[in-house]
Image: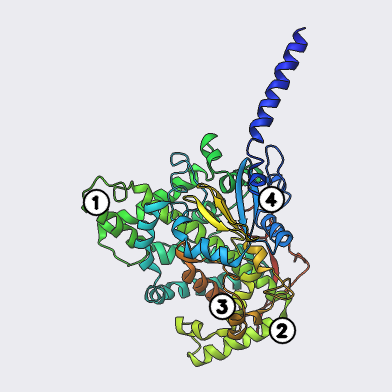
Amino acid sequence: MATLWLLGILVGLVSVIYFYATRTFKFWKRLGVSYVSPIPLFGSLKDVALQRTSIGHFLKTIYDEYKGQKYIGIYSFDQPAIVVLDNDLIKNVLVKDSQNFADHLISMDEKLDPLGSRNLFTLKGQKWKHMRMNLSPTFTSGKMKNMFLLVEQSALQFEKYLEKSVSRSAVVDVKNASQKFTIDVISSCAFGIDSNSLTDPNAELTHQLKKTMQFDTIRAIKATIGIFSPQLLKIFRMNLFETSSYDFIRETVWDIINYREKNGVARKDFLDTLRELRKKAENFKTDDPLYNLEDDYYIAQAFGFFTAGFETSATTMSFALYELALHPEIQNKLREEICQVLQKHNNQVTYEAIQDMKYLDMVVNGNILRYPILPFLDRKCKSDYEIPESSGKGMLTLPAGTGVYIPLLGIHYDPEYYPKPDMFDPERFTEENKRRRPNYTYMPFGEGPRNCLGMRFALMQTKTGLIHIFSNYEVAPCGETQIPLELDKKSFLLCSKGGISLALNKINA
């Protein structure tokens, strides 16, 4: 009797869980919207949750299967969300009606993720707008020119690092090398410190920053939840970043600030911008929470710039090196341009010289097309939003709070816009070819008010690093090179699984 009683309780509990987990699963059907069939607990995300595919490739599969429709419904675990497939609707979400889609979906607990929850990427509403407006002047063309001298100094150290590496072995993990370079650049340009990334294999800053971008199974699950069902992060009190990384960045940044204030040091860099913003808030006596920000709001911007800035540019560099190693004819053409332009600039790598390298720009864009580091865009619908039905039968009202996803990787691989999309082809980015393509078919840095603030800086450091490599080395595949390259299914960014090993052969050695 007791056994039957326990069995009845178990069946009842399972039934409650099942009905709760599937309570929203008729949402898109009731609205007459095509959707990806869900299953309990996972919704439409089973393959992503089980790490059989990455988020970017999951959304690309939807784009490929449903292309021609304006949108397709999915279930982010138990919550309805929408994947936008139509160019005009993408424009509406990112630009025309951006005020209704101003926020990213991810939302972290401020106590568990004090810096991750408060940086420019995760901030929302007026706090985001306030911080964005005040940080934007850091990345003007004039500021980029001033920063370039520091980028070039790091690039010269990068040359020495590569020379030592190649003297030991021609085979170099270019992903690791690129990470060291970009950490050194950002440390110098934004914070005025020497990271020792290129000289000390055990540099603490390098270790801590790399740790923030490493995705094991548990962290990958947390990231997936944060992107598709962020409320669960708060409910289950899950943090994305380790406390040790926060503590190290916080201590490092405060040490620099205190030193500058004590010694009257001003560099007009990213950190000085944060200092000025903080002082303005202190002098502006108000109870308005927009201005009355805790110190961690400012340190969080440094954390965001450190973590996002080094990884995205390093990954872009390493993918470019990989593709150019496999395409020596493109590599030779690029090297020829680099040599010709540098001759016109007294063999000096300058900000102006980089602007003159048109083929380099085509190569970098062609590479980012194949490997958009953030392979999707996400937005949160702020208030009910009407979408014209693709069938012309009326309007679909998207409820407030609905998650919106744009499958960037799918768009970048669409043969309608890019014939033979699996081919690396810089010629796609001639001025003529760019004019022929519709808008919103190449968006690696996003579009609209919430596009990537550091885009110019990212491109500048990436191009500078590539110039110094191809001025001195021929890059080729070796026995350790993965062909084809395996991508990491756990990371929400597009990145290789493990390192990228290539042979660097000194020119005229």
Residue that appears at 63% across and 42% down: 218
Residue situated in front as seen by the camera: 256 or 371: 371
Residue 41 drawn at (x, y percent)? 67, 37
* Badge 2 or badge 4: first in the primary sequence: 4
Distance from the alpha carbon under mark 3 to that under mark 2: 19 Å
- In which quadrant of the rendered view does residue 273 lie? bottom left
Disc 2 designates what residue? 329
In the image, 261: left or right of 70?
A: left
Whether residue 101 is visible, yes or no, is: yes
Distance from the alpha carbon under mark 3 to that under mark 1: 44 Å
Residue 367 drawn at (x, y percent)? 64, 72
Distance from the alpha carbon under mark 1 to that under mark 4: 50 Å
Disc 1 designates what residue? 282
Badge 1 density bin: few <14, some 14–19, many ≥20, Cα 10 Å: few
* Badge 1 or badge 4: first in the primary sequence: 4
- Helix, strand or loop under label 1: helix
Disc 3 designates what residue? 468
* Badge 3 or badge 2: first in the primary sequence: 2
Residue situated in front as seen by the camera: 64 or 486: 64
Q: Amino acid at mark 1?
A: Glu
